[in-house]
Amino acid sequence: MIRSLPVPFVASVFHPTDLTHASDRAFAHALAIALVRQTRLTIFHAGEGEEQWKSFPPVRQTLERWGLLETGSARSDVMDELSVDVTKSQVRGEAYRTCFEEIARLQPELVVLATEGRDGLARWLRPSLAEKLARETESMTLFVPKEGRGFVDLADGTLSLQRILVPVDETPDPVDAIVRATRAAEALGERPVSIELLRVNGEPTAPDLPEHEAWSFSTRSVEGDVVECILGASHDVDLVVMATDGRDGVLDVFRGSHTERVVRGADCPVLAVPSLPKA
């Protein structure tokens, strides 16, 4: 049975950036989610030199463009008027190691990463980061493609989350992914958000699903290659939410896991949700 818990979508957001336009879409998603949740947003970069501070994503200018702050607003207005605590952090050292260490220190609930299509994660992040991130923290990870569709408009910050796809199977347990999909629908979506549970090579059974004005559920069963079926079903959705665990998920990123292959092939954001042990 799906647990009916007062679980918010996220309580803190962490966005690593390489200070290039490749991260712009991921930054917009991280900022929009932090705004909706009125929570902490940490923007992180690993590099050398004070001059790089000027290249950080422009939070206030973006909020002014989105019509949420007056032109020329003070830095303090982000917190005072929008209740978003933004921190920009630059650490010297290797990108993948310092990024992981910062995630381990802050324990954010959501990490928002830019991806580069067939190359998977942005080139400046080595494969070991994704494995360590998932193995040693409990953070969810939102992979946002550099190109393709997103549910946040970079120009004006408009949210357009209408359809969510959740692949389901016995393993990993899909409950946490389904719960997070409903929380995303409630916090970010255009009501009611359509949440489709996709079963590949199995019966289209589903857990006991709660009703809510913010979402509606449907189930579907297809036959074929797991990744190809998921990608095929993802072409007209705004977000894919996938449960992950140590055998098949973010832990096995760059080892050919289902999640990694979906992240590489999807033209929409993919949210990887660790299936945590049940008490």
Image (cartoon, rainbow, N blue to C red):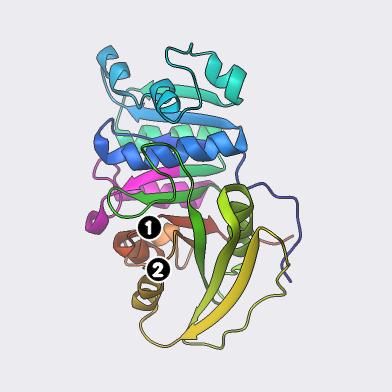
Residue 21 locus on image (x, y percent):
25, 36
Q: Residue at x 44, y 38 (%)?
A: 157
**Magenta-span inclusion, residue 125:** yes
Tell me which segment is drawn in magenta.
Answer: 112-137
Q: Earlier in the sequence, mark 2 or mark 1?
A: 2
| Residue at disc 1, secondary structure | loop
Amino acid type at mark 1: Cys
Closer to the camera, 202 or 96? 202
Q: Is residue 126 above or below residue 31?
A: below
Position of 138 relative to 273 (above/below): above
Left or right: 266 with respect to 102? left
Residue hosting label 2 = 234
For the residue pair 131 and 185, the one nearer the viewer reads as 185
Q: In this orientation, does residue 107 appear?
A: no
* Nearer-the-camera pick, 259 or 218: 218
**Which numbered dot is residue 268?**
1
Q: Position of residue 17 (x, y in %)?
A: 34, 34
Q: Is residue 62 magenta?
A: no
Q: Quadrant of the N terminus?
A: bottom right
